[in-house]
Image: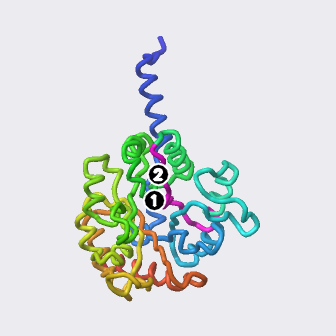
Amino acid sequence: MKYLPSFRTLMVAAATLATLALSAAPIPAENRIGGIAIGCQAYSFNRFTLFEAIEKTEQTGSKVIEFFPGQALSPDQRTIKWDHNASDEVIAQVKAKLAKHGIRGVNYGVVGIPSDEAGARKVFEFAKKMELYGITTESTESIDIIDKLVKEYDIRVGYHNHPRQANNPNYKVWDPNYILALVKDRDPRVGSCADIGHWQTSGLKPVDCLKILEGHIISMHGKERPALGPGQHDVPFGAGGSDMAGVLAELKRQNFVGNISVEYEYNWDNSVPDIAQCVGFVRGWAATH
């Protein structure tokens, strides 16, 4: 007599398949440089379209890209904006463009995640379709629904920090201690998108902040500023005061497996050479450590 699986066995199998279908893929080895998923935040190229940003990311020697919402799609489709409302047709175009240039989309943000489940789920569904590793946000008010959906989708969420706002005491995510308090009792897939340049602007040393958030670093926005405090612009890695070698060493000590997005907010029209130097710094560091 042929074995017939029980109803319960079938339900468990179906649930397992559903979970696998919703799971985001890890960042593969072929999209890492010396084991590090170093790439570009597309915002570095916000004066260009997404397709141009993908091309420029390849030119820097990067292998991954982090999207941001609202970028025009391509030179001949400028009225189409790239975000989590994108149609399946537009998503297919972007996937084809990424494949053509050997770039993998790994993250998306900074994006608002609504506190209502339907709105939040739309962001996560987009991330699932793009097979992203993570989402970047500052939506602290949505922590409960985020905590629920990271479990369901197996997609990470990192809380990003902009600089301290002297005239807005309600803006708290600049402080790594605040982020730690927010995420420490949550699912481990909820943590920090550490923007180390903005920490510098806030007068904080990046390595110290990373240590505060140990075990909770989901991703990083890589910036190098000449010194602590406001009024500094980005420079290539190793040419400023971020102690980038120390940052990379601390991430390695913490067994960090997320992505580092170079977000270069200077020399906007011709930043590829500077970003290429940043990627080269990481490549050289990885080769000797």
Marks 1 and 2 in Cβ contact (< 8 Å): yes
Image-quadrant location for residue 3: top left
Q: Quadrant of the C terminus?
A: bottom left
Give, as a three-letter code, the residue at label 1: Pro
Q: Which residues are magenta?
A: 99-115
| Residue identifier under label 1 | 28
Q: Position of residue 250 (x, y in %)?
A: 26, 71
Residue 22 x %, y %: 48, 41
User: What is the x, y in percent for residue 126?
Assistant: 56, 49
Q: Is residue 238 above or below residue 286?
A: below
Q: Is residue 64 left or right of residue 157?
A: right
| Location of residue 93 in the rendering, given as x and y in whole percent from the top left corner | 68, 57
Q: Of residues 287 and 60, which is closer to you in this image? A: 60
The answer to which of 172 and 250 lies nearer the viewer is 172
The residue under label 2 is which amino acid type? Ala
Please state if 11 lies on the left or on the right of 45 as rendered. Answer: left
The crowd level at tag 1 (other Cα within 10 Å; few <14, some 14-19, many 20+) is few
Colouring:
rainbow
Tell me where residue 82 sits by quadrant: bottom right
Q: Is residue 215 left or right of residue 196?
A: left
Q: CA distance from mark 1 to mark 2?
A: 8 Å
Q: Which residue is mark 2?
A: 25
Does residue 215 lie above or below 4 as drawn? below
Q: Is residue 34 visible?
A: yes
Q: Nearer the viewer, residue 279 or 195?
A: 195
Q: Is residue 111 magenta?
A: yes
Q: Label 2 crowding class (10 Å Cα cut-off): few <14, some 14-19, many 20+?
A: some
Which residue: 54% across, 70% down?
Answer: 43
State which mark lies toward you, 1 or 2. 2
- At a point 62% along the width and 57% down the height, the residue shown is 95
